[in-house]
Image (tube, rainbow, N blue to C red):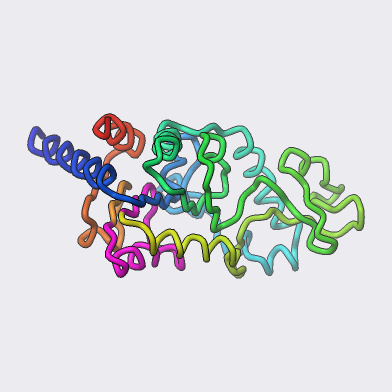
Amino acid sequence: MGTESGTHTREVERLAELIRGAETVVALTGAGISVPSGIPDFRSPGTGLWETVDPMEVAHIEVFRREPKRFWDYYRPRFGMLSDKQPNSAHAVLAELEARGLLAGVITQNIDRLHRKAGSRRVIEVHGTIETSSCVDCGASFPVDSVEGLFDGEGVARCPGCGGPVKPDVVLFGELLPERAINEAYALATAADVLLCVGSSLEVHPVAGLPAITQSAGGKVAIVTKGPTPYDHEADVRLDGDVVEDLEALLAAIG
């Protein structure tokens, strides 16, 4: 146990050293950073969101177009669950690193707004956000807190202006990622001396390809997440403990 603890401490110190010595550090975050805030991830055995439901049957753009009620039957309670969640210390550490000028920005696969709530300023939400929803017919935009008031008697959120169906501004299966966001993510990954991957399995493309972009440009990759990733053997630093504890230890080591 002591050896494991010593190895872990050395990895934290090595990561702190990399960050202190880097000109550009970029964070890439996935569902695992929000689990301590009470938001389940997608694939963890027993708790993952896709454990009991096929995402292609509820979270695909064609389901929304064909059966908006079925889509909202699944998404409506999830919206309610997400809206009151608060950032945890892992989010706070990344915001603090940015405030200190040690982090250029956060690329996130998460739609939960927690990075922004924690105070991060440059957040690239490559899978969209629950912050707003839009009418697919006229384009009218609605803040998250007003969506609940848009549901009709059938349980479909509809635009009060034109009556069209309203969809959350998140990327569903079958949709392309927002071009501006993914282009900014690629640019940041290319410029990064260190890409700090937190709470992501690094399996969902095209975001999963960002570490390879950083490495190809001569940067280093650090991974802080539970469970295996395709980059474990190539990472310059690999931490697999609790993300909150690991990032708090990192901030303490940076000093």
Question: Residue 19, image x and y in percent?
Answer: 28, 45
From what the image shows, is residue 29 above or below residue 174?
above
Foreground of the two, 252 or 175: 252
Q: Residue at x 32, y 32 (%)?
A: 248
| Quarter of the rendering containing residue 174 | bottom right
- The quarter of the picture where the C terminus appears is top left
| Quarter of the rendering containing residue 145 | top right
Q: Is residue 206 left or right of residue 198?
A: right
Question: Residue 27, image x and y in percent?
Answer: 40, 49
Q: Is residue 46 magenta?
A: no
Q: Residue at x 63, y 65 (%)?
A: 60
Question: Residue 171, image x and y in percent?
Answer: 61, 60
Foreground of the two, 243 or 210: 210
Q: Is residue 244 left or right of residue 233?
A: right
| Quarter of the rendering containing residue 4 | top left
Q: Is residue 192 left or right of residue 127?
A: left
From what the image shows, is residue 103 above or below residue 251?
below
- Is residue 156 in view from this perspective? no
Question: Residue 141, image x and y in percent?
Answer: 78, 51
Total labels drawn: 0
- Is residue 187 in view from this perspective? yes
Q: Residue at x 30, y 58 (%)?
A: 229
Magenta part of the chain: 194-220
Q: Is residue 217 magenta?
A: yes
- The quarter of the picture where the N terminus appears is top left
From what the image shows, is residue 16 above or below residue 26?
above
